[in-house]
Image (cartoon, grey):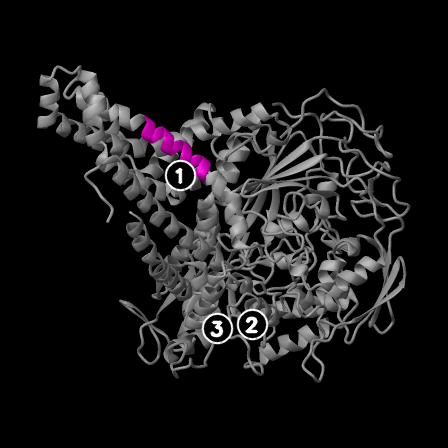
Amino acid sequence: MRARAILSSLLTVAALSACSGEKGGQAGGGAKGGGPSAETGIGKPNPPFQGEVPTGAQKIEEFEVGKYGGTLVIATPGDPKSFNPVLANETSTTEITNGPVFETCWDFNNGTQEDEPGLCEKYDRSEDGLTYTFTLREGLLWSDGKPLTTDDFEFTYQVVTDANVASSQKDLFRQGKDEAGKDRFPTFEKVDGRTFRLKLIQKDVLFHFSVGSLTVVPKHVWEEDFKAGKFNSTMQLQTPPEKIVSSGPFRIKTYAAAERVVIERNPYYWKVDKAGNRLPYLDRVIFVSVPDFNVAFLKFREGETDVLEVRPEHYDLLKREEQKGGYSIVDMGPSFNTNYLMFNLDDRKDKDGKPYVAPHKLAWFKSKNFRKAVSHALDREGIVRTVLHGRGSPLWAYVSQANKKWYPTKVEQYAYDLVKAGELLKADGFVKKDDGLYDAQGNKVEFSVMTNSENSTRIALINVLKDDLAKLGVSVNVRPVPFNDVVTALNDARNFEGLVLGWATGVPPDPALSKNALLSSGRNHGWYPAQEKPVTPWEARIDEIMKLQGEAFDHAERKKLIDELYYIFSDEQPQIQLVVANAYAAGRNYLGNFKPSPIRPVLYWNLESLYLKHPKKG
Amino acid sequence: MWTFLLRRLIAVPPLLLAVSFLTHCLLYAAPGDYFTRLAEDPSVTAEYMAQLRAQHGLDGGLLWRYWKWLLNALTFDFGHSFRFDTPVFSLIGERLGNTLLLTGTSMIAAWGLSLPLGVIAGVYKGTIVDRVAGFVSFLGLSIPKVFFALLMVMFAAVTGWFPTGGMRDQIYWDDFTGWEKFVDVCHHLVLPVFVIATTEMASHMRQMRAEMVETLGKDFVRTARSKGLAGWQIVVKHAFGNAVNPLVTLFGYSLAALLTGSFLVEVVFSWPGMARLTVDAVFAQDEPLVMASVVMATCMLVVGNMVADVMLASIDPRIRLE
């Protein structure tokens, strides 16, 4: 269930159990409707399902049939900030609201990394790519039993595109500005209770994903507040839980500040398993609020929680206690989080007329040979061994190997080769002397590399980097600073020389969503952002590719373009990709259908299909 | 006495102004703001960031922003938290009770133990009782609270006798009866209260003992003894009242510390109180929330001092509040 909150792509910052009762019978008994039951054990759904199975219910074929009942406990670092899915802009909120509580009309499957139907059973795109027609499933109901129709989508669209509502979803729909400088949006047209149409102004290859991130909210509950201009203060943590009417597998039950959020089964949910039993299986899910990942780890180790994202520093200990703790660690392969070293190629000046980077250093950084030499001088295998304890792999492309769909077929690789690095530097006139490397003008090659101090992996990384580059005679000053200082240096002050940062992925992990980083005019084009026109021919080509791929509806054609883009990137090395760590998750052995994915929310993207094989002890 | 109180109250607004302005300056000077962290998301546009900043009043200069804050604060509107989009005092209200429960219990425990123990140690100066009390208080004084708290968390984790954090059971709470809930909260209180109370108690006990030893050596005590009064009568009726004076002042300060004194322990024990709210607010640069917490802590300090002065005046007839 598919955090399609595209927002969750926050660049990784600081890195960034309850049932008694006997063993239950097979599921299915309490499936259709289900009678009231006082049992909290495994076997009968409590709270029970209400009403009939929706005619258009979505059948989940990919998971085994489970059992009803039980509570899943998950520790989350950080408290949710509200329950409003339209306004939410950080993961501790979206990972509860977007998916478990609110669903969208078009979904993303973390397992297959492909999009799939959600509240809508299908959509059609017109020949010219400018009209999208979405059809809702039949018989959809909100968690209060009221019908969910196109009216709700119309309302949500109105809210999201409203000038006074600050929603990040708005950015997905904005298509330029009109003469008066006002934002232009596709027009929404209600066809009937189950069909709506969106007419675009310009082609957008990811438009179905944009509609797919529209977390629909109930018109019958919030229309009044919206009309009174008070939508920004709806669905807050203090709002009575029964008012937060949901469309997802769960609804909010209780909230205690800095302690926990309890969600319970939405009795009207619209998905069924492959045997036709209604979902979700779990009665309740408790999100326990913890101050940080270390406490989350402790709670899992003590058996208080059922699932955990395993951080590298905790891996060994957890692995040793796997049997004793009754859990298994799942190796999810490479994660989506990349790490790169980037030089400042910005030749502009600050307000006081001082260049961002000293001109002689800028000359080194701008040289492709210099960047390639640095890339060759980095022993990525060694970094994996020392910094990642062997659990990771070298990274060559802009995206991680985890990206099944978009990892490029061809990239330039930079084997650890000091001789080659030396030759590349020599070609640029650099001279190695006894006390270090000098450029042709006689300047000693020396620069600083900054990274955010909250991330211990990155600190270790830049220290290894310093040693590696010392072998070339390059001296690096390591500068770990708080994350906000890194961001300020990157976006405003622009006074950094080298920087080690990384990307996390958005959902879907699609290159089109990286346009802020890839386009030369983009704000996140870190080495030289917001260029008025492309400074180099290769950046011009990347701009062109980004434009072409945005209009290519054929996947093969898009893939070819993106492959070319990523190749250029690996050849030019504006960001020297370093390593990618493997991702691990741990889950108790009594948990069924536990299929963590490196895309957020890692542990419970298929929350409606998770189930307990037998009651927990305790 | 009323003139005294009035004078004290008049001094409060300038103090609050100074404290709030300083806090505001510090927040302003810190790099970035609450929305900075959004900037690194490749899908967030400049328009969205600008709209958020404008909506939350982050688009003016230092003085202008302080002035706007001040105008609202004068009408008791301390604004909405950036993170929670909720009025700050409703957030603080949620947490305040939890903090007061922890600090209040600790205070009762600390004072309830330190006064009698201090008196006993003073009376039986040099005996084994005094030595043990002295040892305990030195221990309490010399272990840093944070370290002590961490030790206790470890103790809880290793033995499993106590919860490692939180205020109540996270999982079964909703199914508990009233009595079970009470027991559960008490169970969670034991360790954090132990940590705060031991460290607090140590200094109070030393103080009480010293005062008691001094008072017992005074002339009026000798007079009382020579009048033939029983030993305990002298201690309770005559010496205690005289010896406790400086501790009343300390008590005033500990009232002020009700709000902030348990910060470190709250963080270590994941107590859902003011500390985590405020600390998180500082890290996230949630300005309205930081400002409101600071103003509140300042008020507490002022009130605590005033209470101490009034109490002192009512206990000691030599002191007049003019």
Q: Earlier in the sequence, mark 1 or mark 3?
A: 3
- Report the quarter where the C terminus of chain A lies: top right
User: Is residue A489 in sight in this rendering?
Assistant: no
Q: Label 2 crowding class (10 Å Cα cut-off): few <14, some 14-19, many 20+?
A: many
Q: Position of residue A56 (x, y in %)?
A: 89, 48
Q: Position of residue A143 (x, y in %)?
A: 78, 45
Disc tally is 3
Foreground label between 3 and 2: 3
Q: Amino acid at mark 3?
A: Gly
- What range is drawn magenta here? B100-112
Location of residue A276 in the rendering, given as x and y in whole percent from the top left corner = 86, 38
List the residue tagged with mark 3. Answer: B60
Q: Amino acid at mark 1?
A: Val
Between A322 and A567, the one nearer to me in the picture: A322
Report which residue position mark 2 lands on: A523
Q: Secondary structure at mark 1?
A: helix
Q: Nearer the viewer, residue A337 or A582?
A: A337
Q: Chain of mark 1?
A: B
